Image: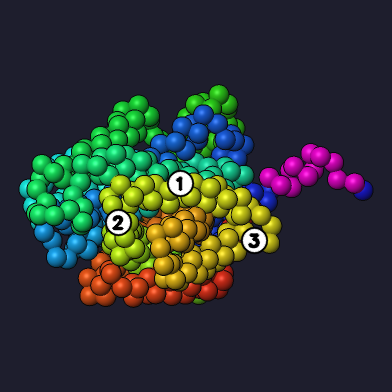
Amino acid sequence: MTDTKDDVESASLRDRTKPVLDRSAVDPVYQAKAHVLNNAIQEIGMGRYQWELFVLVGFGWSMDNLWPVSTALILPAVALEFNQSKPPLLSLAQNIGLLVGAIFWGFGCDIFGRRLAFNLTIGITAVFGLIAAGSPNFAAIATFAALWSVGVGGNLPVDSAVFLEFLPGSHQYLLTILSIFWALAQLFATLVAWPLLGYDTCSKTDPGPCTKSENFGWRWFLIAMGGFAMICFILRFVVFTLYESPKYLMGKGKDAEAVATIHKVAQKNGKTSPLTLADLETHNEGGQQGTDASAALKRKLEKVNLTHVQALFRTKKLAYSTALIMAIWAFIGLAFPLYNSFIPYTLESRGAEFGDGSTYLTYRNSLIIAVLGIPGALIGGVLVETPRIGRKGALALATTLTGVFLFGSTTARNSDSLLGWNCAYNFCSNVMYAVLYAYTPEIFPTKDRGTGNALTASANRVFGIMAPIIAIYADLDTAAPVYVSGALFLAAGAATCALPFESRGKASL
């Protein structure tokens, strides 16, 4: 008998609401309720609420790249003005802040909810970014870089959890497309930096000391970046109303609130949902909602133990998956900043070696490199939904090619060839991050997703702290940091092939 169009669409819908994780990896009651909520969100479909959230979560994605790129862009000017012999110390301060932010906001959003973290992270970034423009010395700018990074470090762990938990299974590929904001942030930062830092900035080739009046460009630049972050904060906190995640509420035993949130989203989208409290309560063990005194006490104690961490190592397969994705994030956490955080510095230093190291050319080339990141993010969105490639294949391919092009950059003998290798590197690294940011939250259950994101982000930031330390002692004027970075990308690409879960075409729990 031939399948009808409705049969095919119904089968596709069922596939899209199948869970990514095995039944043995997650508590069965939680899994049953998550499946009910997945179906409810899928029935509501992609509507106004999710599209508005897509844009606002995109602001968080952009902050995650905007500020590390900003630090890299101001590094040459800051080092010259304050006569700093070890410029990577600024990146070290930033990475310490990113680590603190990833741990605090990532673990915290599983305890005090997504809304508070979602609303505060960009606000913290904006305030300290603006204050940093008035820094009187290197210690001050390093301190403020660490403080604004506490906000930046929480954006991806929190925002990916928020967006995924309101996203229909049929549209989970949008997590990959979100990386277009990540690429646009780099383009925006370099576009602003070119006129501000390209003209009102000291250069290595300039005679005499670098004074504040001759080097005001980086301060104007921080004011521009801080102002942009403040606008994003106002739009997220004042203009948009974020509902608490229904899966988070359900995981905390608040089924009635979870159902109410589903109906609010449906109403915002101009639809209705047939979901009732009974649809969730029917899956409670022993018919209990879990709101008695002992259950309430247990949830309070959960805040001070390792329940969420233990859940991510509940079975051998889930433990293997969690450990491996943490290792991949760690490798990339060292490899990416070891090279990317010093691209403008490298362009200027090697440009001077090639005889064309002007600040104008340095920031012009940084802009060209940034442009190549945009198609990378879009192609990542296509690859993750391609049969036989999926998330794992796209991630392995992009990560490996990123390492290959880094090795290739060491063969450059003039600025144009170095620019070409850097463009190829940035294109592939944007594909890599687009897939990685989408895949990671998909393989964690909602009630532990913030913790899972925090673990991977923390591994990334811990190794990121090592990058400026290596850069200091390996000497940025040599190819040693490039070789280390390239080898780590290749190792991460190989590790990706061993990941046990493929999330393409499946709904997250």
Q: Are marks 1 and 3 in contact (CB under 8 Å)?
A: no
View extreme (left): residue: 136
Which kind of residue does numbered mark 3 sit on?
A: Ile
The residue mark sitting in front, 1 or 3, is 1
Which kind of residue does numbered mark 1 sit on?
A: Val
Residue picked out by circle 2: 357
What range of the chain is rendered magenta?
Answer: 2-13
71 or 119, nearer to the observer: 71
Callout 2 secondary element = loop
Label 2: few (<14), some (14–19) or many (≥20) C-alpha neighbours in 10 Å: many
Residue picked out by circle 1: 371
Callout 3 secondary element = loop
Label 1: few (<14), some (14–19) or many (≥20) C-alpha neighbours in 10 Å: many
Label 3: few (<14), some (14–19) or many (≥20) C-alpha neighbours in 10 Å: some
> Which of the numbered marks, if any, corresponds to residue 389?
3
Which kind of residue does numbered mark 2 sit on?
A: Gly
